[in-house]
Amino acid sequence: MENVDLTLLHPLLEKFSPEGRTALLPALHEVQDLYGYVPEQAAVEISKSLQVPLADIHGVLEFYSLLYNAPVAKTVVHVCTDPVCAMAGADSLFKVMNRKLELHELEGEDAPAITLEKAPCLGLCEHAPALMVRDKPVAPASPSTWEDIVTGKTYHANPIIAGDISVLTAGCQRGKPSKLADYLKVDGYSALQKALQISPEAVIAEVKASGLVGRGGAAFPTGLKWEGAAGAAGSPKYLVCNADEAEPGTFKDRIMMETMPHRVLEGIIIAAYAIGAPKGYMYIRGEYTIPYRTMSQAIEEARQAGYLGENILGSSFTFDLELRRGAGAYICGEETALFESIEGKRGFPRAKPPFPTTSGLFGKPTVINNVETLCNVPIILNGGAANYRKIGTEKSPGPKLFCMSGDVKRPGLYEVPFGVTFRHLLEDLAGGVRSGKQMRAALFGGAAGAFAAEEDLDVRLTFEDLRSAGLPLGSGVITVFDETRNMLDICLRLARFFAEESCGKCYPCQIGTQRQYEILQRVVRGDPLRDDFQRLQDLGQTMTDASLCGLGQTASLAISSAMRLWPELFQPKLWY
Amino acid sequence: MTDKITLTIDEQTVAVAPGTTILKAAGQIGIEIPTICFHDYCTSYGVCRICVVEVEGSRTLVPACIGKASEGMKVHTRTKRVETSRRTILEMLASSVDLSEAPGIQEYMTDYQANTQRFPEARERKPSVLDDNSLFIRDYAKCILCWRCVQVCADDAQYAYAINFSKRGYETQIGTFFEKSLPATTCVFCGQCIGVCPTNALKPKREYLLQNGLSEDEIMKLTRSQRKRRTRRQISSAEQSEEE
Ligand SMILES: Cc1cc2nc3c(=O)[nH]c(=O)nc-3n(C[C@H](O)[C@H](O)[C@H](O)COP(=O)(O)O)c2cc1C
Ligand code: SF4
Ligand code: SF4
Ligand code: FES
């Protein structure tokens, strides 16, 4: 067994010990920060201190891709190879870096201590191709970035934040986190003051009247969710903010947390007040180290100023928020898997019912909302539901953030009222397809979404219009592909993403995502088997119908839509 | 709780106590629904999905082993949709692991006309046999990840917590802390996991050796010396011998 110095570990574990198993991920993170990985002896100590069986710790370590149970090089470089970064040359970037690393190793002596890994979407799509170097984003990267990595330099471009309106993004400045003082200048925390002056029921009524629905993908009415948890038996209640954003192509929550952390926070506090939750958690994906930092700073500021903690703004309402880091698992964005992760377990989704509003985190009534959803809350309370409804359409009220990436001139975050057309978003805002080319397709909703084609350009971006066009809105992510793109290669990458991110709990998805990936490999090679089309269809239907959670249920949607749009790609001519 | 719930399953009406699963409700009127991961003595997590049924008004199929009956519910247990999912799940299983000693699943394969060769060129899960103790072997090339062994080892029965999962997704396997041999874990050799394993992935050592052509005498000798070794090891430090 390796020899590790455990003396550093004990003060750390003493802090976590009273919390028990829920502190497992935070403890593993800190241990890894200390040693660069989680040594076996340290895992034994964690087991004793948190009272978690050894085998369970092993299970957790093995589940999360950012946790290591064996030594890795001091600098781990993650190279995103999902569609957007792939189109920006991520594969050749990876190859070049790999060759440079091998050369260094051949030369011996001065070999830099670097581990190179391919990674799923890092949420930096507007600056593709993206890398993460020792937990820090480097984007856009180029072959010459290698020298910067070796010398320890990192940088990351500032995002484009634009659009027709500036409601959610009001006050957002590129590349600069707003401080409390900045936020106060744009009416910051006035909505919280208003909320505390009315009853929780009145807050819920206002949110219901606004017609706000969840922006995390499922579009569930927010007010109804809050009402469910407020009325449910059991205490304490919990408010959870889902900041696990890992849908390929999505980066809106990251930008909100980086530039407007207090708006997110204000939404969280109001939601907690509405449902009567004394404690909340915010679960930020492990790769998002900068948002984690801006959010912790904002929480500290808010606590100092009396917006968080005991008797908030002199009222009888007490609430505190704990930040949690994910550890490399897309599935932990699924609400029940996220609860399991906070509870210190593998991120296995739970069967529903029961729903979170009656039995969520620690089995208690819980509201879980997406970052963007919660950003709408202060706006609704400030201006009133009626004013809020003036934005957007009757059935899809409010502002919406869209993440535009891929082959567009100006990839970035665009805020628009619901109801503008896709064409407007693409041509007027994002500058149209890059290099004067035509659009071949656009992926709506990320990996879990579906492809749109030319004829969908005039679809209005609302829940109702997209539904009738058979397209998902998802979390508001649109990835554009120009006419030269190899759509099969894109499908293959989506299939690989799901095969790597399936948690493995239920058979249809555990095996189905792997088989789907294998079949697509054949198709891309140009030698599919005769029945592969039918095989893909049966797999897709089975995953959609019989999987336990949303991951498996959507894992074949983009590919099925591609098969509908371009059947000839999947079946070589001879078989027609 | 005397109020009964009335539902229909395949057009037959049945009244059950609140909280009854669709699986049990169907059983009451003699309708059989296939199950793989379900076990009367284990908590149901609904992992295999072979028991899915169509419930009117539900977007997806519903697993009968955990789905609860509700008033007025209309359930269909053998529609085309249901059959496609069940057949495909069986075909996927057959493409992944060795089901030669899982007669129950083989019967379903016949019943649903599942083609064992449906997924050619598929990567199988084929780890080698783990033979690290005198009670049983672990042949995870036969493991269908039904979770039962992990459950009985933990809160469903033994509270020994010797095994859990390694990796995730298709790569998932049942594993121990840092993949140690079973004697080096908290395993108490109660054998409960062997009892609930549906595929013979967990198999008594004797049966395994017999299958491999050893005679009774040879087996006696082998297991006796193994048992001795273990005792010696326990006397010396358990820690050291882990790494042998
Ligand atoms: C595989 C999977 C991944 C998900 N990832 C996220 C995510 O990263 N962020 C998010 O807000 N919701 C995600 N969701 C949706 C959540 O389960 C949940 O519906 C959402 O957080 C509810 O918040 P909302 O009502 O405000 O949208 C995901 C769902 C699935 C099935
Ligand atoms: S659908 Fe996939 S991700 Fe969801 S529980 Fe099943 S295996 Fe896990
Ligand atoms: S070893 Fe047997 S009991 Fe355990 S998960 Fe595998 S098949 Fe199920
Ligand atoms: S028997 Fe119901 S999911 Fe396995």
Image (cartoon, rainbow, N blue to C red):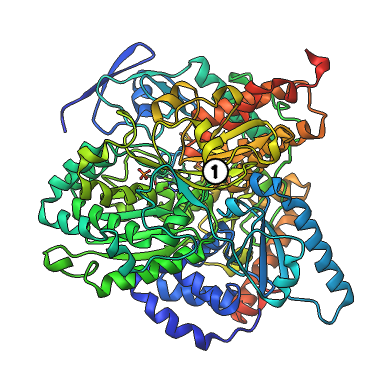
Q: Position of residue A562 (x, y in %)?
A: 64, 27
- Local secondary structure at mark 1: strand
Q: Quadrant of residue A418?
A: top left
- Residue at the outermost right position: A107
Q: Is residue A378 above or below residue A314?
A: above
Task: Determine whether, in the image, residue A60 is placed left or right of residue A393.
Answer: right
Task: Determine whether, in the image, residue A529 is placed left or right of residue A239.
Answer: right
Q: Quadrant of residue B66?
A: top left
Quadrant (top left/top right/bottom left/bottom right) for the N terminus of chain A: bottom right
- Residue at the outermost bottom position: A7
Instruction: Give the camera-side residue of B148 and A460.
Output: A460
Residue at 21% in and 46% down: A383
Q: Is residue A2 above or below residue A373?
A: below
Residue B157: in sight, yes or no? no
Task: Determine whether, in the image, residue A535 is placed left or right of residue A448.
Answer: right
Residue B23: in sight, yes or no? yes
Quadrant (top left/top right/bottom left/bottom right) for the C terminus of chain A: top right
Task: Determine whether, in the image, residue A231 is placed left or right of residue A419.
Answer: left
Q: Position of residue A541 (x, y in %)?
A: 56, 25
Q: Position of residue A165 (x, y in %)?
A: 39, 44
Instruction: Give the camera-side residue of A515 and B39.
Output: A515
Check disc 1 and give the amino acid type: Met
Residue under numbered circle 1: A404
Give the class, few, some or many, for how many residues have Cα within 10 Å of label 1's Cα (few <14, many ≥20): many
| Total tally of numbered discs in the picture | 1
Q: Position of residue A367 (x, y in %)?
A: 29, 49
Residue at 38% in and 24% down: B58
Callout 1: chain: A
